[in-house]
Every structure is written in C-alpha cells, then in structure tokens.
Image (cartoon, rainbow, N blue to C red):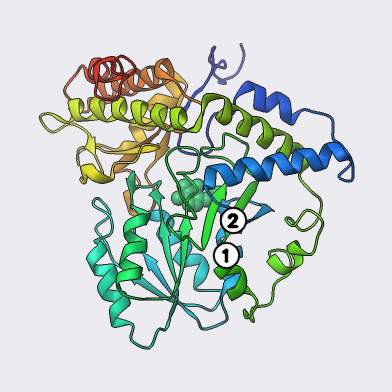
Amino acid sequence: MSGDKAPRPRGRMFFANPGPTNIPDSVLRAIATPVVDAHDPDFLNLYGECVRGLSTILNTKDQIFMYTGSGHAAWEAALVNLLSPGDTVLIVESGHFSEGWAKLARPLGFAVRTLPSEWRVGLDIALLTDALIADVNREIKAVCVVHNETSTGVCIPIQDVRSAMDEAGHEALLLVDAVSSLGCFDFRMDDWRVDVAVGSSQKGLMLPTGMALTGVSAKAMKASTTSTIRKHYLSWRHMASRPERSFVGTLPVNQLFGLRESLRLIEEEGLTEVFARHERLARGVRACVRHWAVNGGPQLYCSNPARESNSVTAVLVPTSQDADAIRLTCRTMFNVSVGSGLSTLRGRVFRIGHLGDLNEPMILGTLSSIEMALVVNSTPHNPGGVAAAMASLVGGPKSRAAT
Ligand SMILES: *Cc1c(COP(=O)(O)O)cnc(C)c1O
C-alpha cells in the first residue's frame, strides 16, 4: 500500500439507505442480458410482464406510464399533464419530499398551497377536510400527498385522505407519491381512488435509479385532455400514441429486464409475505431504537405509533450529537451506508432504510454497526438495542416465531 489511500474494506457494503437500495444479484444479472430489438416478440412479452407486475403492486386496472428518469420525472409528469398554468395545488406537508414536490410545482407556474403539519406526527386529517370545505370556489385542482415520507419515517393513510376529500365533497384530483411504499407495504390505487400514483425504480422495486412510473386513473386521463401546459418528453398523449404506450425516446430495455426479474422475485415471495417481512424488520429496528432511547439516547423521530413507516426509520440523535458523525463512522469504520437527515433534519437525524432486498442478519449487522458507532462517538444510549431487535425479530407479535 502506498500513499494515504485506505485499503478497500473487505466484505459487502451493507446498504441501510432508504434509496437507492440493495439490488438483488439476480436483478443485476437480468440487467446484464444482451439487449433485444424493441420490435421483437421477446421484447413485447417482457414489456407486457412488466406492466402486469406493476399493476399488481399498484392494485390498479388503470393506465401505467413509465419514464426514463428518477421519481422527479414522474412528479413533474403528473403535474404538467393534468394541470394548466395558474392552477392551484394543495400540497400536504410531511417533510423533505413534500417540500420537494412544492419546489418543483412553483416554477412550473402553479399556485402552491401548503397544508401545514407537524413532521413527527403527520397530517391532521381534520385540517385537510376543513381546507377542502373552505375552498368554496373549488380553486384546488389537485391534492398532493406523500404516502411514506422518506425523510421522517412517517406514513399517511391514503384511505383517510380519500375519506376527507369525499366528506368535503371536493372533486380535486388525488396525487400520491408512493415512491418509498410501493413493494414495501399495501398500496391500493383503485380502492382508494388515487388519480395519479407516482413510483420510482430505486426503492422497494430494488432496481438501479433511472426509471419512474405513474399509474393514471380514467378521471386523470380525462383531466389531461384539457391541460394547456406545453410538454413533449413527459406528455401522456404522446406516450399513449406509441405502441408501448409509455416512454418517449429510446426504451430502457435492460432496465426492463431488471424490472421483470424484481417483479418475479416479489411474486415468488408473495406480496403478502413481502409486506410481512418489511413489517417484521421495521419492528425489529424500532425495538432497537426504543431501547437506545432510554435515558436520553437516540429516539424514533416518528412520534405517532399509528403512522410508523415499515420502509424507513428516522432516528433523532441527542441535541449534543451530530448525526452525520455517527453516519461517517458507520461508513468508514464498518462499511455500512446509513441515510442522512434531509432539509432541516440534516445533522439531527440519521435514517435506517429497511426496504427492498433485506433480511434479518443484514438488519442486525446494520444495527450492531450503528450501536458500535454510538460507542465510538460517545453518544449517550442504552446499550443492548440489538438484543431488543433480536427479541422482536423472533419473539415479537409479527415475528417469524409468532407466525
Ligand atoms: C426517493 C423519493 C422520491 C424521488 O426521488 P428521485 O431522487 O427523484 O427518484 C420521491 N418521493 C419520495 C417519498 C422518495 O422517497
């Protein structure tokens, strides 16, 4: 060894980041399949299987459009296809990702209203009902909600949002960011009458970043015909006129090979078991953090037990501590990638992603490494969180032993 470059650590990097997530080996191999001609029957089969699999995960019979881009592309597609300049959108505040949606909407020329919420608790549904009832001139054209706020680890029950809209008798479109819930816990586009569901490849779908999707209801398809915003690359009308009814430009064939394999893995495990695994691992993580929290240690950022996320846990560190220092120790000393705090939570929280291709030993390895990082950084905590996670994983109400 020469110079000051540290040797590469041995073993695998543990990815406990809420996105991008671990890519299963078989998905990586599928992506390495030699490209096929997009006019070939093999490709049409591949494409059909991808659409069918995504429809199952979204629980929808509606149209699905796919994009080469990250989740932002699907957010933008939803807004520019449905709305016209000056239209009002109501964004339910939840954290960094609701802010991101608002940041994207403003320069596009929409009037953005934000429904405030306490980040640690999540939306007060009654406030949404009130805001919709108060909109007597029906200025609000779309209500935008993040199903699982990846920055806080708080989820919002979409069925309650739908009920609030029904109670107010408001006809606005319901746009839901399901990027970090799809493939992790239940999402019912048709039952909840979601007009646009936004998804992305690099979270629960276990793929590289670079593909996004929207499920689009019949009501939203109709609304899109009156939109006066100019668009081309993200235009649904343009996409619908293509044989694939998705994408504009070259098709990401190898990404679709990967998607077919990730959908196959989900089907093989069974969606119910995929959700149960996410819940079991999430409960284990929370049991660990609750244990650390005793006597002023790091605690769950989500303070609303009914809304704890099964895909990501944000951990609030004691005020004397820097969450990024703990992350840095995890990465440099133990080769574990932990998510950072976003927006105003930078340095105050770290985030444990427990979505996608993960199992018990990966979660325990991650939690052990974080607990060691707490020791290294002299962060106050109640030692033994990992034992609490182990007890939850085999002995808790939703554990393997209990089922
Ligand atoms: C990751 C994520 C996004 C999309 O971000 P991109 O980086 O554009 O893919 C959007 N919303 C939520 C809730 C997310 O977790």
Vertical placement of residue 94 versus 30, above or below? below
Tell me if label 1 and label 2 are in contact, CB under 8 Å: yes
> Which circle marks residue 78 in the picture?
1
Image quadrant occupied by the N terminus: top right
Measured Cα–Cα span from mark 1 to mark 2: 7 Å
> Residue 203 at what x, y percent from top left?
52, 39
Q: Secondary structure at mark 2?
A: strand
If you read the primary sequence from the N terminus, does the residue marked by circle 1 or circle 2 appear first? 1
Q: Nearer the viewer, residue 241 or 367?
A: 241
Which residue was labeled with disc 2?
Answer: 214
Q: Is residue 375 left or right of residue 30?
A: left
Q: Residue furthest left?
A: 295
Q: What residue sits 57% from the left and 17% below the top? A: 8
Residue 20 seen in the current view:
yes
Q: What amino acid is found at the position of numbered circle 2 in the picture?
A: Thr
Q: Quadrant of residue 174?
A: bottom left
Q: What residue sits 59% from the left and 56% below the top? A: 214
> Residue 75 at what x, y percent from top left?
55, 60
Q: Secondary structure at mark 1?
A: helix
Q: Quadrant of residue 306?
A: top left
